[in-house]
Image (cartoon, rainbow, N blue to C red):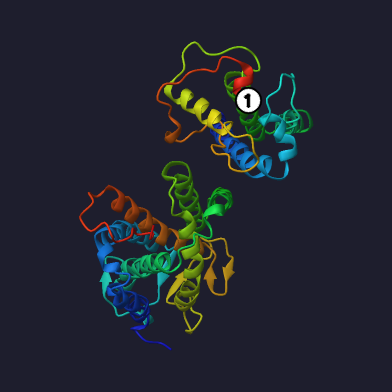
């Protein structure tokens, strides 16, 4: 299965269903766009910038066989699209799950989960300081989760972890596809000297934390915006987290 | 360079120990070891509490590291870790046992806003004497929501328990 539209197709597939259901009258995600789209944009710029640096440094790279050939500086257009399509789909899932499932299963345990993740990621980040992908991802995760736990202290961590668990299903599909589970050569290759070498199927373990940040950063900004922007009329609609 | 790194390690350890203390307090002391910690949520006039065993346990890593990495072998970085834990212990005793619980009758002449917030948070923690349902488990870190409007020190030691 070699097609120059492969990576583009993955983006489209991930984006299109959430987009169509964004206008569902019962849970209208498009009404949240004024918080969600700027949040995705800000975090998108951050991840594109990071991606450019790591692509230039050869931490990872892209296989032209699966690409349309349109480039944005040193990044394939599909890779740039990824940081807007995937967070959109993830934030839609977060919104939809909050709408569908009212019970906040993980709230009583969110500090325990965060504590565990913070200790593990900060220790891994320091231990693998000479491996760019491992240390950058682990330290970002550790510090951003600490920032949430100490400073932001949000009500949504339980719901976020619940969503993340559900999102692992599409994550495994898309990331397996990107790392070459279904193709002769991967779409994205990783220099194993810059990661810790542990893979789940074909996926480097760092991707699980990277993916968590791809979701949590826009979730954080969207909630911040929703709280800070002056409230417009129609208080009947529920918040981003459905509470 | 070594001095700088050691200072960094000591400070990080200090901060990390606040996390360890918070974590243990929330999930272990108010969990399976409530049998020890209960004595600290009881009004009494004894000099010691069963809960003081925790302080003893928390000092063991520091004592052990100081001993092993100075007498048996030498490693400045590990000694910095031991120093960080030790400094946390000193701050903990001054803040928690003396200033908050008045186990020695001393209090600072002036208190900063942040110190007031920490003290207040811990009094909020002690407003309930149960295993479950307490809040504010931290010691040297307290979120802004615990800032008191006007802070007053308790007069009697029994009021601080």
Q: Quadrant of residue B156?
A: top right
Q: Is residue A125 above or below residue B129?
A: below
Q: What is the quadrant of the C terminus of chain B in the image?
A: top right
Percent x, y for residue B2?
A: 57, 32
| Residue in view at x 73 percent, y 28 percent | B52
Position of B105 relative to A198 (above/below): above
Task: Determine whether A17 is above or below B37 in the image.
Answer: below
Q: Residue furthest bottom?
A: A1
Closer to us: B41 or A215 = B41
**What x and y, as percent, mark residue A159?**
46, 59
Task: Place residue B131 in its image quadrant.
Answer: top right
Identify the residue under disc 1: B161
Left or right: B118 in relation to A228:
right
- Mark 1: which secondary structure? loop
- Provide the chain ID for the residue under circle 1: B
Q: Is residue A28 left or right of residue A93?
A: left
Q: Can residue A207 be seen in the rendering of this structure? A: no
* Identity of the residue furthest to the right in this view: B72
Q: Residues within 10 Å of mark 1 (few under 14, many from 20)?
A: some
Residue B32 image point, x, y percent: 72, 45
Q: Quadrant of residue B146?
A: top left
């Amino acid at each position: 299965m070699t097609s120059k539209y492969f990576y583009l197709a993955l983006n489209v597939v991930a984006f299109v269903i959430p987009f169509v259901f964004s206008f569902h009258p019962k849970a209208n995600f498009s009404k949240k766009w004024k918080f969600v789209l700027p949040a995705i944009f800000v975090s998108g710029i951050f991840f594109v910038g990071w991606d450019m640096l790591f692509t230039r440094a050869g931490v990872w790279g892209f296989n032209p066989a699966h690409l349309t050939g349109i480039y944005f500086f040193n990044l394939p257009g599909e890779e740039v699209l990824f940081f807007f399509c995937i967070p959109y789909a993830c934030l839609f899932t977060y919104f939809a799950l909050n709408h569908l499932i009212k019970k906040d299963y993980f709230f009583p345990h969110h500090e325990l989960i965060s504590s565990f993740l913070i200790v593990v990621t900060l220790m891994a980040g320091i231990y693998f300081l000479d491996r760019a992908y491992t240390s950058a991802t682990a330290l970002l995760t550790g510090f951003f989760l600490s920032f949430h736990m100490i400073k932001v202290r949000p009500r949504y961590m339980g719901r976020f972890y619940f969503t993340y668990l559900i999102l692992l299903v599409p994550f495994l599909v898309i990331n397996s596809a990107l790392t070459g589970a279904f193709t002769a050569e991967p779409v994205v290759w990783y220099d194993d000297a810059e990661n810790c070498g542990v893979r789940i199927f074909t996926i480097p373990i760092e991707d699980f934390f990277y993916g968590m940040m791809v979701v949590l950063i826009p979730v954080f900004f969207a909630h911040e915006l929703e709280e800070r922007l002056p409230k417009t009329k129609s208080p009947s609609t529920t918040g981003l987290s459905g509470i | 360079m070594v001095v700088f790194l050691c200072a960094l390690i000591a400070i990080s350890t200090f901060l990390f120990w606040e996390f360890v203390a918070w974590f243990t307090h929330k999930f272990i002391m108010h969990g399976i070891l409530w049998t020890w910690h209960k004595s600290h949520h009881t009004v009494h006039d004894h000099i010691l509490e069963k809960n003081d065993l925790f302080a003893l346990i928390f000092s063991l890593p520091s004592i052990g590291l100081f001993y092993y990495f100075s007498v048996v072998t030498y490693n400045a970085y590990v000694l910095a870790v031991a120093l960080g834990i030790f400094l946390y212990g000193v701050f903990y005793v001054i803040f928690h046992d003396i200033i908050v619980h008045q186990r020695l009758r001393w209090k600072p002449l002036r208190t900063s806003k942040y110190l007031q917030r920490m003290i207040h948070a811990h009094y909020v923690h002690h407003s309930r004497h149960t295993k479950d349902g307490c809040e504010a488990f931290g010691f040297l870190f307290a979120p802004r929501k615990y800032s008191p409007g006007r802070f007053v020190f308790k007069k009697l030691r029994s009021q601080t328990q």
